Amino acid sequence: MSKAKSDTPLMRQYASIKGRYPDAILLFRVGDFYETFGSDAVTAARVLGITLTKRNNGGSQEMELAGFPHHSIETYLPRLVRAGFRVAICDQLEEPKLAKTIVQRGVTEVVTPGVAFNEHVVDRRENHWLAALCGGPDAYGIAFLDVTTGEFTVAEEGTETTAKLLEGHAPRELLLPKGARDAFLESCASKYRSYALDDWAFADDFAKERLMHQFSTASLKGFGIDHLKWGQRSAGAVLHYLGETRHDRVAHITAISRLRPSDHVGLDRFTIRNLELVAPVNEGARTLLRAWTDA
């Protein structure tokens, strides 16, 4: 593409959109390419193995650029997400030939480690959990959603049981309240790929309203979670996050159930790994899950 001058309409448009998604790598569609700029370009070049260049901004400063053909997004997007990055895909919203000035652009999807439908990102043979956690210090609400299947569960337990639930589900992404000052929540934030949401996303009334709207019900009694206040807050935060990442394909999420750890025998991640239930210890080995899905 042409020189990326910061005072051009194109770069002003880019800066405006990037400002709304500061925590994501912005793939900015320019003609037949998805371009990245600045620190995003440095990261994309390193993770994807693509060329990093620099262009003069019209002054003494230079801006890094890295891009790839738009038809290669199926190849490059999964690499970024699997590396743990949130990716905002910014597309051209009108035909360039019809644009009177600069082409209108906007983010059409935000793909994150826990929210992805792309078959090149998601392994359909295993659950792809997005989790949310709040509460403390005596009880914590935790919700798990697999957006690919619509399976949605919630629990409200103490520290030890909640830690085991997290370990057993191994969420791809964990949502937490931004203002939380709790030792357990802070430890989980460092242990899992986490993303902080504003405190109001975990508010009681907000969560209940989101859940009832999703399931088209007047209460949550039918799901057996009406008394799980912390659990409801976490579940509501999950639904809110789907909206924030521009995922409106939620019609398949039709119910939520209570997760009762006492009804199950749990396996820690070391046992799961050593038995090769889900992932092989040695490359190319056959797991129990693979044997079952191939049967």
Image (cartoon, rainbow, N blue to C red):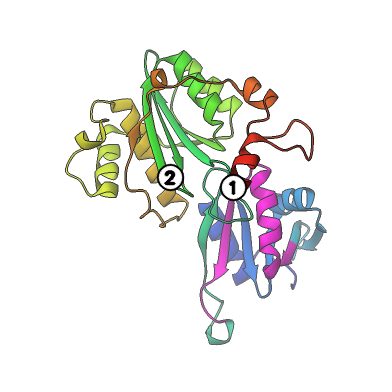
- Earlier sequence position, callout 1 versus callout 2: 1
* Residue 177 seen in render: no
Question: Residue sitting at 59 percent across and 62 percent down?
Answer: 14
Above or below residue 34? Residue 218 is above
Q: Which residue is mark 2?
A: 241
Callout 2 crowding tier (Cα within 10 Å): few <14, some 14–19, many ≥20: some
* Residue 56 seen in render: yes
Residue 273: x percent and y percent?
A: 67, 26
Q: Which residue is mark 1?
A: 86
Q: Is residue 179 left or right of residue 68?
A: left
- The answer to whether marks 1 and 2 mark residues whose Cβ atoms lie closer than 8 Å is no
Give the extent of the magenta segment: 67-95
Q: Amino acid at mark 1?
A: Arg
Above or below residue 271? Residue 211 is below
**Magenta includes 89?**
yes
Residue 170: x percent and y percent?
A: 56, 31
Q: Residue furthest bottom?
A: 97
Q: Is residue 62 left or right of residue 179?
A: right
Q: Amino acid at mark 2?
A: Tyr
Callout 1 crowding tier (Cα within 10 Å): few <14, some 14–19, many ≥20: many
Question: Residue sitting at 51 percent across and 26 percent down?
Answer: 166
Looking at the rendered structure, the secondary structure element under dot 2 is helix
**How many marks overall?**
2
In terms of depth relative to the viewer, which is nearer, 218 or 85?
A: 218
Q: Residue furthest front?
A: 295
